[in-house]
Amino acid sequence: MPARDEHTLDNWLSEQIDAILLEDATDRPVPRSTDYVVQEEHYSGKHGKHTVKNLININRNREVGFLSQTYEGSVHDKTVFDNETLNFHREGFSMVHDLGFQGVSIENVQVIIPFKKQAGLSMPDYMKEANRIISRARVRVEHVIGCIKRLRMVKEVIRLKRDQIRDQIMLIATGLHNFRNRFRAKLET
């Protein structure tokens, strides 16, 4: 199962041979609430529907090491990151993010974020090449999210109303992904 607290995260980080971690947030659809306040909290303007959101952290072996608590869809990715009290005690880590995490800085950790194109200007070739390299690394986290969403309850609208159950389902889906990933690795050796 992925880490949910700082102690378990420290144990997972100490086991990591590779010092590159990939991080991204994933949205899951929920039904539209009849309560207007809840509707506003869960409405994601980016996706145009009502969602809940989790932050996942993976290593290069596609193992989910950390799963954040579940947040409303209107909460920005960087805000979710800031609310989670992640403490990376090991120096020398690099974390690869997307543009949703602009402004993130972690002590003793190198944060890698793609360059953003400025309005009205063309992006220089070296920035384009750097973005291509970052994108090649980040595609792994997108594939992991796709593998987690094999479970239909995670991919489609979940009609269960309690937030704790929605959170547990995401935890189970990531645990199943880690199990499949380890089982596949054992078959290959």
Image (cartoon, grey):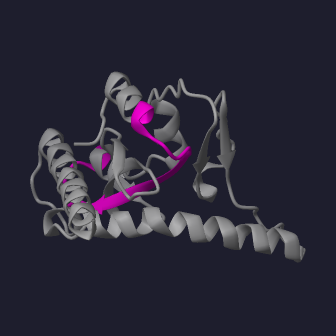
Q: Quadrant of the C terminus?
A: bottom left
Number of marks present in the image shown: 0
Q: Quadrant of residue 16?
A: top left
- Can residue 91 be found in the magenta stretch? no
Nearer-the-camera pick, 5 or 178:
178
Indicate left or right for 132 with 40 as reference.
Answer: right
Q: Position of residue 28 (x, y in %)?
A: 29, 60
Is 13 drawn above or below residue 62 in the view shown?
A: above
Q: Position of residue 86 (x, y in %)?
A: 47, 29
What residue sits 30% from the left and 43% below the top?
70
Q: Position of residue 50 (x, y in %)?
A: 31, 60
Q: Quadrant of the N terminus?
A: top left
Is 127 drawn above or below residue 82 in the view shown?
A: below
Is 105 drawn above or below residue 172 in the view shown?
A: above
What residue sits 70% from the left and 61% below the top?
114
- Start and end of the magenta stretch? 13-37
Indicate left or right for 139 with 31 as reference.
Answer: right
- Can residue 33 be found in the magenta stretch? yes
Nearer-the-camera pick, 164 or 169:
169
User: Is residue 120 something one can see in this rendering?
Assistant: no
Nearer-the-camera pick, 17 or 128:
17
Residue that sits furthest to the front in the current view: 189
User: Is residue 130 something one can see in this rendering?
Assistant: yes
Q: Position of residue 100 (x, y in %)?
A: 58, 55
What residue sits 21% from the left and 70% below the top?
150
Indicate left or right for 139 with 115 as reference.
Answer: left
What residue sits 15% from the left and 69% below the top?
152
